Image (cartoon, rainbow, N blue to C red):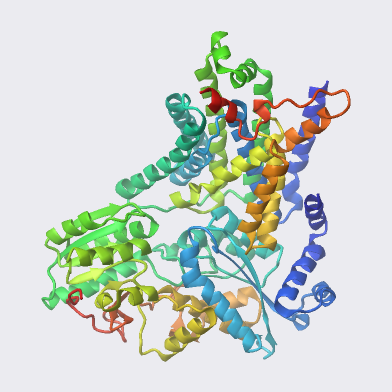
Amino acid sequence: MRTALGFAAAAIVFAVLAFAPFYLDAYGIGLMIGMTGYVTLASAWGLFSGRTGYVSLATVAFFGMGAYTVAVLNETLPYPVILLVAGAIGLLVAVVVGFSTLRLAGVYFVIFTFGLAELIRQLVTWFETTVTGTLGRYIFLPVGPEHIYWQLLVLCAATLFITWWVGRSRLGLALRVIADDEVVASHIGIDIARTKLALFSVSAVIITLVGAIQAPRWTYVEPAIVFNPTVSFLTLIMALLGGASRLWGPALGAIPLFLLFEWLSANFPDHYSILLGLLFIVIVFVLPRGVAGFAKDLTRRRPGGTPAAPKLDAAPLGTESREARS
Amino acid sequence: MGLSAMRAEERADREDFSMTTVTRRRALRYFGMSVALGAVIAALPSAAQDRTSVKIGYAISKTGPNSGGAGITTLPNYVLWAKEVNDAGGLEMPDGKKLPIEVVEYDDRSSAEEVVRAIERLATQDKVDFILPPWGTGFNLAVAPLFDRFGYPQLAVSAVTDKAPEFVKRWKKSYWLLGGGHDYTSALAGLLTKAAGEGTINKKIAMISVADGFGIDLVTAARPSFKDAGFEVVYDVTYPAGTTDFTPMINEAAGSGADTFVAFSYPPETFAITQQAQVAKFNPKILYLGVGTGFPVYGEKNGANAEGIMSLGGIDPKNEANAAYRKRHQEVTGQAPDLWGSVITYNSLQMLQEAIKRRGLDRDAVADELSNGTFQTVLGEVKLEDNQLRKLWFGGQWQSGQFVAVAPVDREGAAPAILPKPAWK
């Protein structure tokens, strides 16, 4: 019953959002594109990192690959096929990378994923300079901002649905055990590596598609533009602010933070970075467990409720307990 | 809290609400008018006779990787121009009335998505009269479809691209003022041909380039340019951006038997190569380096050793208008303009100013004037050909503390190049 209500509510929200381009001007649509993009990125990030505790900084590696695929293929293939190819490339890279690295734990994984983004950027640069002899690529596709927005909206809805589904499936159950104790998980017959790999791949494909869908907005693409590490950091911060392990957590973080960035850069263009830094400090002190975790704490503190237990899924980085164990 | 409420409110009645806040903020900052007065003025219909200012907006990389270039070539000129115009009473309209410039400035933080949204904001929220372009080839291309859609002329300066003729067809109100890679390399090939014809240098070239946008563009253009001119590129390698040790490359180039050494480099590497060539006692007859050579600080740092080194750009020291501009730039912004794109940027602003004086604030009319009009600017007489500035200095050389234009060799005013390059001191 609650699920049905939740679905109905979500459907209404997305339906209303789908009509937004008819009422907004170009700036409004631009704002919605940015916001939907980051909600999707943060949710996809949370899908893997929030559930496994593996903090990934590879977001921009996949995001950039998606954008670059569109840049390379936009003159040779029809647009829907390009998106499929981009998704397939994302999947392939995720499987290869996942197989070789998901055994790394804690801070090693963080460093590896950060390096991965740089590695892919340098590989693309190397390929372009030595093989094709050009670096910048042009994207001239008849894709208007409202089309980009609708595609992102669909992807966003799909991401949330997948997240919800994973939470209720055997996979989600397995993840919960893994997050609590990997040793116990492997003893009761859970294939840890395969479970993590599956989730990493799904998350990576979504992120790749976000990059692919947004690419036509820039007209000109070069590695420095699409492999901008800020994307990885913003995604991570947004997901953590909202609560990376919950269904709506990343969205709760991404929407206010995105609007705040926008408001700061419109009104305090010269003090943006300083204010942002101060804000992050405040967030860490006031909401160390994210908005969703904070809300849960509040409800639990009510008379009769049990006190909030410090669980992995709500911990700010989700890595401490894992590091202690590994 | 208040933030989402504010957004909702702003969206609900964007027309007057947001305009009021923006005007109020700018009014306080730039004119010191009272808040109430600012609000009242903003509420008035913006017909020409009621105008009290002209809104000029821009988004520029004040932070992030692009801030270095933007802070040298572009932003100081925007600041200088707005100040000069306002000190003189404002932008002159066709009826002789003067309206002060009201600047709306955003930082794109060197992010492509940010610069796109900032231009959307300038066009639809701030409703500025004209938008000045961002810095860099990539960003100018990223915003070109938006300038086109909202009907703003785009005077792209810091964008070196060989595709300008295509872009002009695609975006009718786009203007490309800094030429393309091929222009620079064929001008260099022309200079080399002349020197080889005089017997000063042999027909061999050693060439290195940074594996990034600028280096790739230039080296891709240079290979056919040199080949067509009958030169042989005997050494041709790329290096990743951020390389600090050039000794192996310099040694290879020295051993290649080429009299000409060309490096399409970025500023940090340009400085490093200059230093390391001296240490290696590598003194080719022609030394041509990339971005950074035209920075005033390059001449200051290298002193007498800069003598004879060549690069892109250059200025005509006999041009008095340019000399006066350089002095004002130094006084107002506290830094000297570079010796390549700076003066072109300032020239683009003068063109805009003059076009507004002739045709008013109608953007279509101004665009038409920019395409077809002839302008007297800091560069002298300027007329665009197919929306592009073709009369440019494509090569310069340090000569007695000045970065003097030497190429194209057949253009009037080109100084003779000092060849071969003098020995390191």
Outermost residue on the front side: it is A324
For residue B293, which quarter of the picture?
Answer: bottom left
Residue sitting at x 45%, y 65% = B159
The percent coordinates of residue B270 (x first, y second) are 32, 65
For residue A52, which quarter of the picture?
Answer: top right
The percent coordinates of residue B157 (x first, y second) are 47, 70
In-front residue for pair B79/A82? B79
**Number of marks in picture:** 0
**Is A142 drawn above or below residue A53 in the view shown?**
below
Outermost residue on the top side: it is A188
The percent coordinates of residue A53 (x first, y second) are 58, 28
Residue B352 visible in this rendered orientation of the protein: no
Quadrant where the N terminus of chain A is found in the figure: top right
Residue sitting at x 45%, y 35% = A112
The percent coordinates of residue A40 (x first, y second) are 63, 38
User: Is B199 on the left-hand or right-hand side of A214?
Assistant: left
**Is B30 drawn above or below residue A323 in the view shown?**
below
User: Is B403 on the left-hand or right-hand side of A225?
Assistant: left
User: Is B380 on the left-hand or right-hand side of A324?
Assistant: left
Residue A101 visible in this rendered orientation of the protein: yes
Residue sitting at x 20%, y 73% = B424
**Is A172 drawn above or below residue B242 in the view shown?**
above
